[in-house]
Amino acid sequence: MKPRVVVIFAVFVLAVVAGAVWFLQSQGPAPISENATPAPAPAAPLIVDTGTVPGTPEPRHAPGPRPANNPPAPPPRELTAWERKIDEVLTSGNGETETAQLLINLLPTMPPEGQAEAAQHITNLILDKDYGRVMPMLRNPALAQEVQDVLVTDLMNREDPVKLPALLEVAKIPNHPYHEEAMTDLQIFLDQDNGTNWSKWDGAVREYLRKQAAEEAAANVPEPAPVPRK
């Protein structure tokens, strides 16, 4: 082939290649097909919730205290002589009044704490109609203070026909530990102050109780039945 022909052929090939490159660049990037399947996203790592922060050991609970060995129960306390006496009287099977009288008879043989406990039982057992059995104890100023406290506390919860005459008896004893309190209670109940005029106090108590009984009797009278109309 002649050199001139070769040069012409080479120029022609270069022109064809340049035209093809220009054509491809002018068309832009090839469109993505709608039917193309997108590449799957990478799967997230599986995390198992163990309740603890990764890399930290689980806390260990301190063991609870060991149950202490129960100490043996102490032996029952032996009853004193006066406690045994009170128990024997209370379990003797006698009636309330007889049991109270047995305890009254035992009272002088007991220490103060025994007398106070016996007095509690006596005041619980004795009825208003039998309160005269307690009066020798109540009038005794030498009786232990704790016994007098029991007797006077019980007396203030009794009905007026028992309470007021008993308070008057205590008020008449100047060295009685409840002398002043008995005088004050009489003044409040009877609304008068008769000093040491005991006969006047006696009359005031009887009159107060008489009026009270009359009022109670009137309150308990049934109303007359209505007369039917003719």
Image (spheres, rainbow, N blue to C red):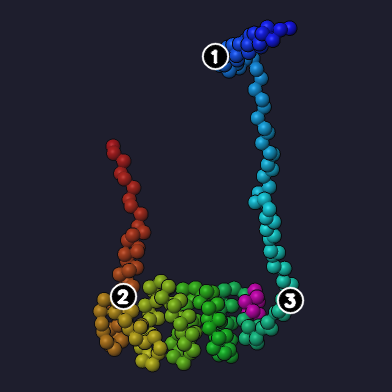
Q: Quadrant of the N terminus?
A: top right
Amino acid at pointer 3: Pro
Does label 2 or label 1 sit earlier along the sequence? 1
Q: Nearer the viewer, residue 88 or 204?
A: 88
Q: Tell me the mark number nearer the camera, choosing from 3 and 1.
A: 1
Say whether residue 125 is magenta. Answer: no
Q: Which residue is mark 2?
A: 189
Does label 3 or label 2 sit earlier along the sequence? 3
Residue at 30% from the left image edge and 44% from the top image edge: 227
Q: Secondary structure at mark 2?
A: helix
In the rendered image, residue 111, in percent from the top left (x then y), is placed at 57, 90
- Are dots 2 and 1 in contact, CB under 8 Å? no
Cα separation, mark 3 vs mark 2, equals 57 Å
Q: Is residue 136 visible?
A: no
On screen, residue 211 above or below 166: above
Residue at 36% from the left image edge and 82% from the top image edge: 182
Q: Nearer the viewer, residue 9 or 4?
A: 4
Q: Nearer the viewer, residue 74 or 197?
A: 74
Residue 26, numbered circle: 1
Q: Is residue 54 left or right of residue 128?
A: right
Mark 3 surroundings: few (<14), some (14-19) or many (≥20) residues within 10 A: few
Residue at 53% from the left image edge and 78% from the top image edge: 120
Q: Which residue is mark 3?
A: 72
In the rendered image, residue 119, in percent from the top left (x then y), is placed at 52, 81
Q: Nearer the viewer, residue 83 or 221?
A: 83
On screen, residue 52 above or below 61: above
Q: Secondary structure at mark 3?
A: loop
Q: Tell me the mark number nearer the camera, choosing from 3 and 2.
A: 3
Magenta-tinted stretch: 87-93
